[in-house]
Image (spheres, rainbow, N blue to C red):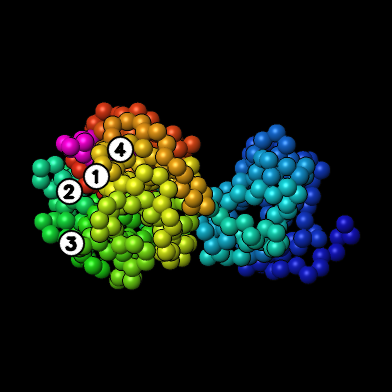
Amino acid sequence: MSGIVQNNILRSSGTIAVTAAGLSWGTAVVTGSTVTVEAGNGYWINTTSNTCTITLPSSAESGDQIVLIDYARTWGTNSIFIDSNGLNYQGNDDTYTVEYTTDGQSVNIVYSDATKGWLPLEDDVTADVPVAPPTQKAIFAYGSTDAKVSMSNLVNSSGVVASDVTGVGTDRNGLAAATYDLDKAVFAYGNTGSVTSLKNLVNNSGVVAADVTGVGTARERLAAASYGTGLAIFAHGTTGSATAISNLVNTSGVIASDVSGVGTARFGLAASSFGGDKAIFGYGRPSSGNSSLTNLVSNVGVLSSDVTGVGTARRDIAAASYGGDKGVFGYGISGSSSNVTNKVSNVGVVATDTTGVGTARYYLAATGYGGDKAIFGFGSTGSVTGITNLVNNSGLVAADVSAVGTAREKPGAAGYSTSA
C-alpha cells in the first residue's frame, strides 16, 4: 500500500473508516468452525471441512466495513453463518439466522446505523435474506371434556407436554390457533355454547391473556396457520353452515375483518405453514360428505382456489409444520376414525396416504415445536383422550405417548417462543 488514504468516510466519532481498497487482508486462511472478525478487515473463509459461524463486532460505527471471501468455493457444501452479535443485519435483529450458501460467494458488508445495521454491498449477496428464527415451544389450550374448558398445556422444545395450567378466558371448543410475530400465539373463534369470535393472545413465555373482543364472523371448527414473516391467517369453519371466509392476523396479533371466501366452504379442516413463508388449508367437511381438497396461501396472505385432493377424504383432522419448510396432515374421521397422515412438500404438494401410527382419533390438534418437529395431541376415539404423537424432522410419526393433562377434544394448538 502507498499509505495514501482516498475517498474514506468520516465516522460520527471523528475517526476515518477504511474503504474497500484500504482493507487489511491477512495471509491466514480461516478454517475453524468459528471466528470473530473486526471492522476494516477482509477474511478468507475456507469451509472445506466444516461450516463456519462468523461473529461480527459487538459495536460498530457508520462506514465500518468487513469483507468475507469463499476461499475454496465450498460455501455451497458447508455454509457460513453470520452472528451479528447484538446489532441488526439488513434491519433484522440477531435472533434471525443469516446464512450464505453459494460457492464462490463474497460478502462485502458496511455498517449503516442502529436501524438497518450491517448491509451487504454486492448484488449476489443482497438476495440472501435472513431466515426467521424457528419456533421452539408450543401450547395446547381450550377444548371440551364433557364440558367446555379453557385450561392449557405447554410443550417444551423437546416435545414434553406439561400438566394442566389453570384456564384463562372463556371456556370454549372448536377454535383454532396459530403462531404470530415469530414467538407468540393467538387462539380465536370457537364455540362457547354458541359460535364466537373471541381471541386470546399468548406471549413468548406461554402465558395466555384474557379475552379480546372478536373481529370477523363468529364460527367454529375452522383452521389457522402462519405465513409470511410473523403473520397468520384463520379461514373456513362453520357458522351453522360451512363458510370459506378468512381473517388475516398482523405481527401485533390484531385480527382483521373478513375477507370473502375462496374455495369450497368447509369445516373440520386443518392448516399448516410450508416453504418457510406460505400456508395450506386442507381436508374437512363441505355441505355434505368429506373432502381432501386443499387451498394454498401465498406469502402475502392470498388464499387460492381449490386444488384437487390427495389422500383419504376426511374431516376433524389436524396439521402442523415440520422439517423447517414442510407440513403434515394427520388423523381425522372418514367412515371411521383414522390415523393416516399426508405429508406436504416445501412447495405445497400433498402426498398420498402414509400408513397410520398411533391411536386413530379425530377432534385433535397439532403444532410445530423444537424448530423442526411437530406434535399431534388430544382428541376423541369415541371418548376424549390426552395422548400425543411426536413427529420428527423427517415427518415420521412416533407411537403414542401417554396422556399428560386433562383428556379433551376440539382444542387448539400453536407454537410460541424462539428460545429453547
Q: Is residue 319 magenta?
A: no
For mark 2, what is the residue?
A: 150
Element type at mark 3 = loop
Q: Which is in the foreground here, disc 1 or disc 2?
A: 1
Q: Residue at position x 30%, y 71% from top? A: 257
Q: Which is in the foreground here, disc 1 or disc 4?
A: 4
Q: Earlier along the polypeptide chain: callout 1 or callout 3?
A: 3
Q: Earlier along the polypeptide chain: callout 3 or callout 2?
A: 2
Label 1 close to label 3 by CB (< 8 Å)? no
Q: Nearer the viewer, residue 159 or 12?
A: 159
Mark sitting on residue 338: 4
Cα gap from disc 2 to disc 4, whole angstroms: 27 Å
Cα gap from disc 3 to disc 4, whole angstroms: 25 Å
Q: Residue at position x 31%, y 55% from top? A: 223
Residue 317: x %, y % from top left: 30, 46
Element type at mark 1 = loop
Cα gap from disc 1 to disc 4, whole angstroms: 11 Å
Q: Is residue 382 magenta?
A: yes
Label 3 close to label 4 by CB (< 8 Å)? no
Label 1 close to label 2 by CB (< 8 Å)? no
For mark 1, what is the residue?
A: 363
Q: Residue at position x 33%, y 36% from top? A: 339
